[in-house]
Image (tube, grey):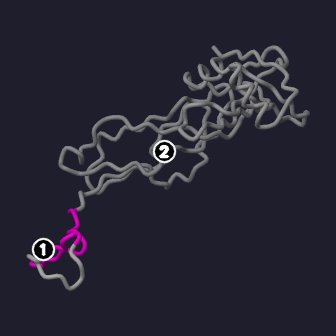
């Protein structure tokens, strides 16, 4: 079941007015796409936060706009805690779109049990799928990942009706041998460590 967001027309713009809008419990938003005019909207903060927490991408707008829309972009504050602005794109549930989806690793890699380190180098992939069937995430099982092995985007299992857009050869995760700690720079074997505060030319033991 899709989230329904009750939106209102936003007639005033500018940083100061948007700040006031957010203080009143609403987030500034814009609706565009399908060759129609852009519409400035506001959406209740709690409603959009709930939709994002549920990983909803396709939502139904009600009130000032009555149509299906994709949450195409979300602007957050510096700390990633407060939603500052939302972009909605007009779409329909059966329309095929290209979208980025998060990757979640599942299981404990075999190489990790042998002392290896699992490094995830890619956390999202781009796929094409119906707007009404966007997955919240794609899960990649790493249980059989040994030291020296890697898994690529091509190893992801696509949901029904979805197609991978990102290059299948792009690496997602690998298991590597731990690197030995480098020796501290500037302190070689047998070298005298620098005494903090000693003046140049001052002999050790001087008051």
In the image, is residue 177 above or below residue 141?
A: below
Q: Is residue 170 left or right of residue 73?
A: left
Mark 1 is surrounded, within 10 Å at the Cα level, by few (under 14), some (14 to 19) or many (20 or more) other residues, namely few
Residue at x-position 73% and y-position 21%:
43
Residue assigned mark 1: 207
Residue at x-position 81% and y-position 37%:
14
Quadrant housing residue 86: top right
Disc 2/disc 1 C-alpha distance (Å): 58 Å
Q: Is residue 129 left or right of residue 61?
A: left
Residue at x-position 30% and y-position 39%:
143
The verdict on residue 60 being magenta is no
Between 147 and 21, the residue placed more toward the observer is 21
Estimate the x, y position of residue 9 in percent, counting from the top left: 85, 22
Question: Farthest residue toward the bottom?
Answer: 201
Observer-side mark, 2 or 1, equals 1
Name the element at disc 1.
loop
Q: Which part of the image, by quadrant, shows the C terminus?
A: bottom left
Quadrant housing residue 5: top right
Question: Farthest residue toward the front?
Answer: 207
Residue 1: which numbered mark, if any? Answer: none
Q: Earlier in the sequence, mark 2 or mark 1?
A: 2
Between 87 and 3, the residue placed more toward the observer is 87
The verdict on residue 191 being magenta is yes
Residue assigned mark 2: 123
* Range drawn in magenta: 180-197
Magenta segment's dominant SS is loop
Quadrant housing residue 195: bottom left
Name the element at disc 2.
loop
Mark 2 is surrounded, within 10 Å at the Cα level, by few (under 14), some (14 to 19) or many (20 or more) other residues, namely some
Estimate the x, y position of residue 47 in percent, counting from the top left: 65, 18
């Amino acid at each position: 079941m899709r989230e329904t967001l009750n939106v209102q027309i936003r007639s005033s713009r500018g940083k100061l007015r948007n700040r006031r809008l957010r203080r009143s419990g609403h987030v500034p938003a814009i609706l565009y796409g399908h060759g129609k005019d852009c519409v400035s909207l506001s959406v209740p903060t709690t409603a959009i936060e709930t939709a994002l927490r549920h990983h909803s991408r396709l939502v139904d707008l009600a009130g000032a706009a009555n149509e299906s829309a994709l949450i195409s972009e979300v602007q957050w504050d510096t700390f990633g805690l407060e939603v500052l602005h939302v972009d909605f794109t007009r779409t329909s549930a059966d329309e095929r779109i290209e979208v980025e989806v998060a990757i979640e690793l599942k299981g404990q890699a075999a190489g990790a049990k042998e002392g290896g380190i699992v490094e995830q180098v890619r956390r999202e992939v781009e796929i094409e799928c119906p707007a009404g069937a966007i997955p919240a995430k794609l899960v990649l099982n790493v249980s059989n990942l040994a030291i020296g092995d890697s898994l690529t985007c091509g190893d992801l299992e696509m949901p029904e009706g979805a197609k991978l857009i990102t290059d299948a050869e792009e690496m997602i995760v690998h298991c590597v041998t731990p690197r030995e700690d480098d020796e501290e720079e500037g302190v070689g074997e047998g070298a005298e460590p620098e005494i903090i505060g000693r003046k140049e030319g001052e002999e050790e033991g001087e008051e």
